[in-house]
Amino acid sequence: MILEALSPIKGDYHLQNYEETYQNFRWEEAEKNFSWYQSGKVNMGYEAVDRHAEGFRKNKVALYYRSNDRLEKYTFKELKEWSNKVGNVFKEYGVKKGDRLFVFMPRSPELYFAILGGVKIGAIVGPLFEAFMEGAVRDRLLDSGAEYLVTTPELLQRVPEKDLPDLKTIFIVGKDVQEKEKYVDFNKRVEKASKNLDIVWVDREDGLILHYTSGSTGKPKGVLHIHNAMIQQYMTAKWVLDLKEEDIYWCTADPGWVTGTSYGIFGPWLVGATNVVIGGRFSPENWYKALEDFGVTVWYSAPTAFRMLMGAGDEIVNRYDLTSLRHILSVGEPLNPEVIRWGMKVFGLRIHDTWWMTETGAHIVCNYPSMEIRPGSMGKPIPGVEVAIVDNQGKELPPYQMGNLAIKKGWPSMMRQIWNNPEKYASYFLPNGWYISGDSAYMDEDGYFWFQGRIDDVILTSGERVGPFEVESKLVEHPAVAEAGIIGKPDPIRGEIIKAFISLRDGYEPSEQLKEEIQAFVKKGLAAHAAPREIEFLDKLPKTRSGKIMRRVLKSWELGLPTGDLSMMED
Ligand code: WT7
């Protein structure tokens, strides 16, 4: 059945023998790696930063940062001091354990100091992707009851303060900030603050980070992670990222997404690795140059980025010295075998696919350096976690049968709440303890998992999850739009693109200009990545008798596939 397999690469890996470790590993063993195992005092910020700053890694570079106009580096000692200063400023303005503190800013050292500073004083930190527009910002701050926000003067324009009664204080990162009412000059206050912080010890089950993510219905939901996630993030930084003392690691994801926190902050710093953060926008030249200039050894990115690099051609790769690279990983959507073959050709390395999701908080199904890779497969479950393909009742299915990709409840980094929505949280789990991911997959006879698709209508565009409902709701706010249905349409570079089917209100006529206007409307109201790249006008949308738009039918029309059961469709 397996057409091709890429053998494990010989070498000295953290996970030497996958099968043996999978059989024997218990999470209780991993706990011994943390200082709280002895001290009883827990805080992610301590484990990820202060612990190293107090030990032999004190003067090791923790962070390299480069953007158009900045090039900086910080040792673990400096990272500790900066995050302490920020923590002190937050404390001064009343931030307490459990308070929601949001960060809405571009990637910069200050963003990382702010996240760590918040974590160190026990706040629940909510990172917002810098591309979010007003509507998206409002929904997330409102739902979480955020009281504190760190942002820049530019992004402050997109914060609808008058709609946010809970928002008490806004820390503004910029030059010449006018302090008034809610506004605090972040840089000035941080400069003056003490380098010594009384860290706030928390319980392992206390809130750490709140990531908003999309589902098929309703507004984005707040996925709450806790300090205990460090156990799994630490182990997978070793097993999967294979981070070692001398590694220079670059995770290309923004902290606005879970990859950018779990593996852009916590995992790598828990194991004391050097992190590279690059500001600004993607371009093949910038990226290859970053790999070369920083001597990146371990690189974690996404299929959409690899496809764009592949599209830029092989000639450009050869202009850079990428010999430092040792290990490459991918996450976010299916990794095409074609991309793996390209990676072998240009980097001489296998790209390792990893599967997990916002809700899982850390890696779940992965490919490991010591294991054979079957291109197209997501790999095998990490040690300590049980994964299976189950039917809708939670019955395990035999190899090659397609079903729900499910995880046995209780892995250390599992989300602990959907904010304000216990029903939603409960709906993820079956009574017999399986967490249902929303992905369909099958397992082969050797235990490799193969992704087949989303069960719901969630769209994966450039590795980002877009909930159709949120986009549809925004579309119908446009005066010309009567009804809208959204689907993901397969796309060679982006995985999927968003296509909108729209019926117009009386008095409006389809036109190219109207399409562009509607696209701009969504871009401005939600985010650029949520705007439909394609729009098609229909007189009427296919709906169920109860009035639900049948996205499945739109999708089969689009793809020229049979529409299946139409008994639910209105006449
Ligand atoms: C959804 C989760 C966790 C980091 C990024 C995405 C899809 C994720 C893979 C993969 C095929 C994948 C799934 C999943 N997905 N990784 N290796 N192969 N699909 O996090 O935004 O929560 O999205 O992304 O559909 O459910 P997210």
Image (cartoon, helix red, strand yellow):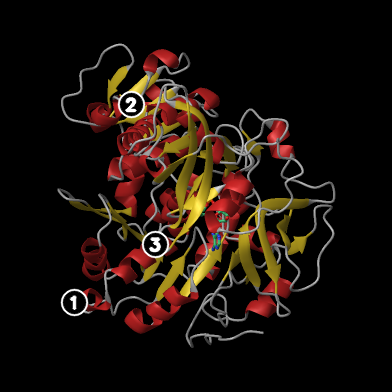
Q: Disc 3 residue type?
A: Ile
User: Which badge, 3 or 1, comes first in the chain's sequence?
Assistant: 1
Q: Name the spot of residue 39 as percent of width and height, x first.
A: 59, 48
x, y percent for residue 31: 63, 57
Side of 173 where 197 appears, left or right: right
Whether residue 208 is visible, yes or no, is: no
**Disc 1 target residue:** 319
Which image quarter is the N terminus in?
bottom right
Q: In front of the other: label 3 or label 1?
A: 3
Q: Residue at x 51, y 46 (%)?
A: 44
- Amino acid at pointer 2: Arg
| Closer to us: 198 or 532 | 532
**Distance between the alpha carbons at the discs numbered 3 and 1:** 23 Å
Q: Please give the residue where the numbered disc 2 appears in the rendered image.
A: 158
For label 3, the residue is 493
Contact (CB < 8 A) between labels 2 and 3? no
Q: Quadrant of residue 570?
A: top right
Relative depth, front residue between 273 and 102: 102
